[in-house]
Image: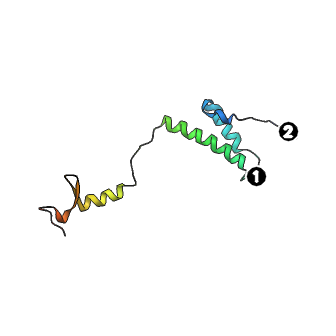
């Protein structure tokens, strides 16, 4: 069987300037790299290409920001148990006219 070897050099220092077509081609070639799984250089190359693909995708498709925040859980508990009165959080048992079960 006749075989041809092709060497492809990836301009890793200039990924932002690659066309989408070249970026996709380099990513596919990097995935098909015949080195053993766990090879450091192969993993770093695929990672760099993947991050550039994701960066472009997010730039073109801005994500919903602030849909969930770490503070939401605490805020819902605070809101269920009291409210802010003149800049001070007050438990509902201390609010006039509020009935606490």
Please identify the quarter of the rendering in which residue 22 is found: top right
Residue position for label 1: 36
Residue drawn 82% across the image and 37% down it: 5
Drawn side of residue 95 relative to residue 9, left or right: left
Residue 99 coordinates in the image, percent (x, y): 15, 66
Q: Which quadrant of the figure contains the C terminus?
A: bottom left
Left or right of residue 2: residue 96: left
Give the class, few, some or many, for how many residues have Cα within 10 Å of label 2's Cα (few <14, many ≥20). few
The N terminus, quarter of image: top right
Give the structural element (helix, strand or loop) at label 2.
loop
Real-space Cα distance between discs 1 and 2?
21 Å
| Residue 15 position in % (x across, y down) | 63, 34
Which of the 4 image quadrants contains residue 71? bottom left
* Disc sitting over residue 3 in the figure: 2
Q: Residue furthest bottom?
A: 101
Name the residue: 35% across, 55% down.
Answer: 72
Which of the two marks, 1 or 2, is nearer to us in this view?
A: 1
Depth check, front residue: 94 or 14: 94
Residue, x 45% and y 41% (percent of image)?
63
Left or right, 76 with respect to 14, comes to: left
Does 66 sit left or right of 15 as displayed? left
83 vs 54, nearest the viewer: 83
């Amino acid at each position: 069987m006749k075989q041809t070897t092709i060497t492809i050099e990836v301009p890793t220092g200039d990924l932002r300037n690659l066309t989408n077509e070249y970026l996709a081609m380099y990513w596919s070639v990097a995935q098909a790299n015949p080195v053993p799984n766990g090879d450091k250089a192969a993993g770093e190359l695929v990672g760099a290409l993947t991050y550039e693909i994701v960066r472009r995708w997010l730039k073109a498709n801005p994500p919903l920001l602030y849909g969930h925040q770490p503070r939401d859980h605490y805020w819902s508990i605070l809101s269920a148990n009291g409210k802010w009165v003149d800049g001070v959080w007050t438990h509902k048992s201390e609010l006039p006219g509020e009935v606490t079960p």
